Amino acid sequence: MPTSGHWLPYMERNIHIWTFCNVVYITLGRTTTEERMNLIDFLTGFFGGGIAAGLVGFLARDWLALRIKTAIESEVFVQHAAFDIKRLACLEALAVVDAAFSQREWKQSEAPILVAKQPLDIAAARRAYNQLALTCTDSSALDLYARALGLREPDEPPIQGSADLIVDLRNAMRHELGFGTDLNLSRSKAWIASLDGAT
């Protein structure tokens, strides 16, 4: 046992060794107190104070840096995956709205508009609704999607929709995806009804 004048360095060395033992045993999945005490006794007798402190400091720092790096990479991966799921959900929902709009009769200045139809898949519409409900942090995009499809309560009158509603839906999705402010697009040409030569 060291004399009273040297007990601080002795305690500091043992604290370093105790920390090192915890790192080793936690890493190996062995966490019993008896096993830790045995390793402490061994390292205390085998290493000098300076060597032990340096070794413990190096290994603990390297281990902690690796744990932090792994945690950050895992969080970034989850965020990227969640963003990709939400982005695809928004794109699929917009495709469903395009198909739904193509099945309606539209007028401009009281004159019928020629609309090129595209297939409307009920399974795709339901899937897009579910995907938006699972991934969106705000209900605005989901509510506008439902309005664009004419969804309503049983006691509500039919929704008199307008094709320019898709402008609001796109902007709500831009907010969900973190793409910034609204785009002030012309509402008179917000949706493509037909194109010359298109099928």
Image (cartoon, grey):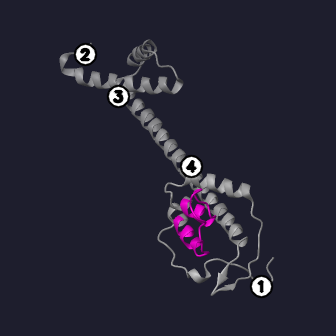
Mark 1 vs 4: CB contact within 8 A: no
Which residue matches tag 2? 2
**Residue drawn 43% across the image and 23% down it:** 21
Which residue matches tag 4? 77
Which residue matches tag 3? 50
- Indicate whether residue 158 is drawn in magenta: yes
Q: Secondary structure at mark 1?
A: loop
Residue 48 location (% of width, % of height): 36, 23
**Residue drawn 23% across the image and 20% down it:** 7
The mark that comes first in sequence, 2 or 4, is 2
Q: Secondary structure at mark 3?
A: helix
Task: Classify mark 2: residues with Cα within 10 Å, few (<14), some (14-19) or many (20+).
Answer: few
Cα separation, mark 2 vs mark 3, equals: 15 Å
The mark that comes first in sequence, 1 or 4, is 4
Which residue matches tag 1? 196
Q: Which residues are magenta?
A: 143-172
